[in-house]
Image (cartoon, rainbow, N blue to C red):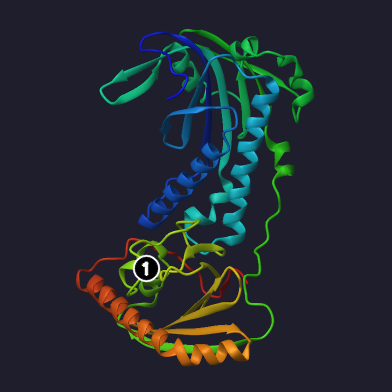
């Protein structure tokens, strides 16, 4: 940790806590797992948006305790930091609305999550207990208590008067702020803590509107290969396994030991991964769920070829899986593919489907579910 004082030496420091709220208590394993994934992604967004040299002391559930030893930041620096984190947070949430595939309670209500900030300043101590280093002191307690307060807004940035007095050029806040500054205070057993705060709702105007990119191959495309197999497992289980990108190296033969370049743990339009044969980055899109049929497409980022997957329910314990490979219409490439790649690809898919069937049958015999699960609704269309 940089800029950390020696043990037991109180030093002035900024305490900065972004806190996420809004998820209800979920019951199903899928919703609990997905809510954890969503919160983890949002916490990473907040950490990546750090522009003022903040250090992470610890992750506290849905909040991050940041600190920075030394002089207090200016009002402009603090407001810019809040704005950057807030806009990045809500931009990511909008993506769940426009790009998501899963229809579980956690994924459907992610856009209801809110973000607030508590910023305080005072003398704190960095102590080490065995391998753990943590912040200690009265001001750390004050900052945590302020997370529960009488402010009526769900989203706001709070700055204590102690911080304001330490900030150089705090008078600039009136010109840098996006809304009028409001004032409040809380009574604790240690005394009153006064603060000012800014509602964050006006910053929603800076959150960009998102649309799902058209990832499909432009122009005329031609089918160059297709495969089909029957998996002795329910449709939902087969889709859960096939759409679990990190798990693919377990059942696709001759693949890399680990799937890389994944931009999202949960299936969504625009989810990427590196081809398991050390090829280009692949984009997943076109997810559709009709009655007894699920389809989706994977296209390389250059939009030169794609594979359309179709999963069809045969009965409660059998699913037909089909792959159809397409490339841009080009006579020479079609000929080369037919001569040198078609049989190899068909053999690879045959082995992969056999491995998939064996894995799913094993789950059923042990009466287990695949750990990665997606909830779909019938006649669901998510992206081009």
Label 1: few (<14), some (14–19) or many (≥20) C-alpha neighbours in 10 Å: many
Q: Is residue 214 above or below residue 346?
A: above
Identify the image quadrant of residue 129.
Answer: top left
Q: Nearer the viewer, residue 206 or 199?
A: 206
Q: Nearer the viewer, residue 96 or 44?
A: 44
Residue 244 image position (x, y, % from top left): 40, 65
The quadrant of the image that shows the C terminus is bottom right
Residue 109 image position (x, y, % from top left): 54, 52
The quadrant of the image that shows the N terminus is top left
Q: Is residue 242 above or below residue 140?
A: below
Q: Is residue 213 left or right of residue 287?
A: right
Q: Nearer the viewer, residue 123 or 338?
A: 338
Residue at 48% over, 16% down: 142
Q: Is residue 199 left or right of residue 139?
A: right
Tell me, yes or no, if residue 359 can be seen here. Answer: yes
Residue at 34% over, 67% down: 249
> Which residue in the protein does label 1 denote?
248
Identify the image quadrant of residue 89.
Answer: top right
């Amino acid at each position: 940790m940089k800029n950390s004082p020696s043990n037991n030496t109180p030093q002035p420091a900024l305490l900065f806590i972004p806190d996420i709220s809004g998820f209800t208590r979920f019951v199903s394993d899928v919703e609990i797992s997905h809510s954890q994934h969503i919160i983890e992604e949002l916490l990473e967004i907040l950490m990546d948006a750090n522009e003022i040299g903040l250090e992470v002391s610890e992750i506290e559930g849905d909040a991050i305790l940041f600190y920075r030893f030394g002089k207090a930041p200016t009002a402009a620096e603090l407001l810019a930091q809040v704005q950057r984190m807030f806009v990045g947070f809500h931009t990511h949430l909008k993506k769940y609305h426009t790009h998501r595939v899963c229809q579980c309670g956690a994924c459907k209500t992610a856009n209801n999550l809110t973000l607030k900030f508590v910023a305080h300043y005072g003398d704190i101590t960095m102590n080490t207990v065995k391998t753990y280093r943590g912040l200690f002191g009265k001001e750390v307690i004050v900052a945590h208590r302020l997370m529960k307060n009488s402010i009526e807004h769900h989203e706001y940035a709070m700055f204590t008067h102690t911080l304001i007095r330490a900030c150089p050029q705090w008078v600039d806040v009136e010109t840098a702020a996006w809304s009028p500054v409001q004032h409040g205070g809380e009574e604790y057993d240690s005394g009153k803590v006064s603060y000012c705060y800014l509602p964050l709702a006006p910053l929603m105007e800076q959150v960009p509107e998102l649309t799902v990119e058209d990832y499909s191959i432009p122009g005329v495309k031609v089918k160059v290969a297709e495969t089909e197999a029957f998996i002795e497992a329910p449709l939902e289980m087969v889709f859960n396994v096939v759409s679990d990108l990190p798990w693919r190296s377990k059942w696709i033969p001759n693949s890399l030991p680990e799937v890389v370049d994944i931009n999202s743990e949960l299936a969504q339009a625009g989810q990427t991964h590196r081809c398991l044969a050390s090829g280009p980055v692949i984009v997943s899109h076109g997810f559709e769920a009709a009655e007894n049929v699920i389809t989706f497409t994977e296209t390389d980022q250059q939009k030169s070829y794609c594979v359309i997957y179709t999963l069809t329910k045969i009965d409660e314990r059998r699913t037909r899986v089909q792959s159809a490979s397409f490339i841009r219409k080009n006579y020479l490439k079609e000929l080369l593919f037919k001569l040198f790649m078609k049989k190899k690809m068909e053999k690879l898919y045959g082995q992969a489907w056999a491995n998939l069937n064996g894995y799913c049958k094993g789950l059923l015999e042990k009466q287990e579910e695949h750990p990665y699960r997606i909830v779909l609704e019938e006649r669901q269309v998510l992206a081009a």
